[in-house]
Image (tube, helix red, strand yellow):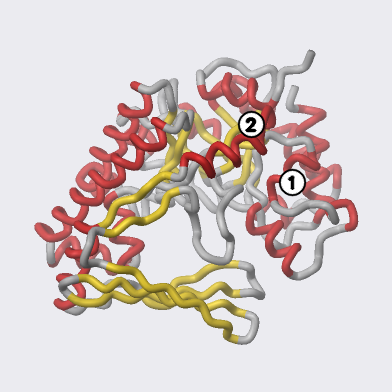
Amino acid sequence: MPASPRACIESVLRRQPPARFVYAPNYWQWFAHHLNHRLLPPELAGCRDQLDLIRHLGLDVFSRNAYCDQQSCWFGGLAQETLAPGTTRQEEAASDDRDRVITRTYHTPRGPLTERQRYVFAESTLVQEAFLLDGSEAGLDAFDALVHARRWRFDATAYAEWQARVGDAGFIHPGELYSPLKLLHLAAGADNAVFLLQDHPERCRAWMDAHEEAQLDLVRQMLAAGVPSMIAMDNLDAAFHPPHYLEQYSARFYQRASELCHAAGATFFIHACGHQRAILPLVASLGVDGLEGVAFPPLGNVELDEALQLAGDRLIITGGISAMETERLQTRDDVRRYVEGLLRRLQPYRHRFMLSASCNTSIRTRWETLVWFRDAWVEFGA
């Protein structure tokens, strides 16, 4: 009897050779775009979401966004933000032509904070239009109050329901976490975070320490709910997480989260996007189990087989199919040759590799291209 998708993924999480290569793509944005723009092919008429699409193609599920509302957030959906008494959150959504504009205001004892996001219908993507931190001193005071008032509550029931729906096809891989440094990126933008760290080092340290403890509490909740693997949604690119920043601001969180997961028999991943060459050895040394969506040239700066070598003998890497491939490869033979060459190179590492998106599937990808990748994986993934 062939090994189930779940069994193959479990083998990789244990660093044991799976019966075949795991193929767990990310079709989140692609499916939402084609559904909302009425572009789905007739074969997918019965699909409600990307999980149905993955099941339709007979692929593996190792998904951190199957449950995520594509029009409201970049990640998350299983952990509810909770605020201490005296701090409240107000959220409003309005239409602007076909776009959706979300305005989110936190009222703290030290003043309000407001951010604005826009779901761009034409591109099926969420963009930040205004950050919580605008550079004012009053904003810094209010953010201090928010960070110390905020915790998260994991919805174990919703997680169990999603995992039951996945069944033997694989795992829901909750993407609810983000590091202390990512806290500043989300609040101020990656560029302005640099100035915050330079101008207000002690204040930033206090924010990051408080955020770290709140996030580790969330890690413990997920482990108590039986989550076998989780992921921090940090976009771990050396351009924004250079080695000295990673060591100074995020390493302790990654190490502590990894230790908590290992003590419970679980694994801890980080979402990676962009350039990773400079940080691979450091990330591996912290006990992190895997990097999701590692980019390779021309989008990244390290080939996947080299990344697996640089990362020691235990770090798992997912990726291999970027927008460059799904848009550039125009025929079945093109896709077949690409997948054959990639899996041949990565055969020695199939116990530490999952074929997936690096890090998304372009909305411009044709449906037949997704089918061709599935067919090539079936042919060469054994």
Question: From the viewer's perspective, is residue 37 above or below residue 345?
Answer: below
Is 371 positioned to the left or the right of 338 in the image?
Answer: right
Of callouts 1 and 2, which one flags the residue occurring earlier in the amino acid sequence?
Answer: 1
- In the image, 278 versus 365, the foreground residue is 365
Q: Is residue 148 above or below residue 93?
A: above
Which residue in the rendered view is the most extreme toward the right?
42
Q: Is residue 225 left or right of residue 212?
A: right
Q: Please report the residue visible at 32 percent of the width from the left and 48 percent of the height from the top.
A: 179
Question: Where residue 203 sits in the image (x, y, percent)?
Answer: 12, 60
Which residue is outermost to the left?
A: 202
Q: Circle 1 sits on which residue? A: 52
In the figure, residue 106 lies in which quadrant?
A: bottom left
Residue 90 drawn above or below residue 315: below
Disc 1 residue type (three-letter)? Asp
- Residue carrying label 2: 170
Q: Measuring from the top left, give residue 365's x and y in whole percent.
A: 74, 57
Residue 374, position as x, y percentages in the image: 78, 39
Q: Position of residue 299 (x, y in %)?
A: 54, 53
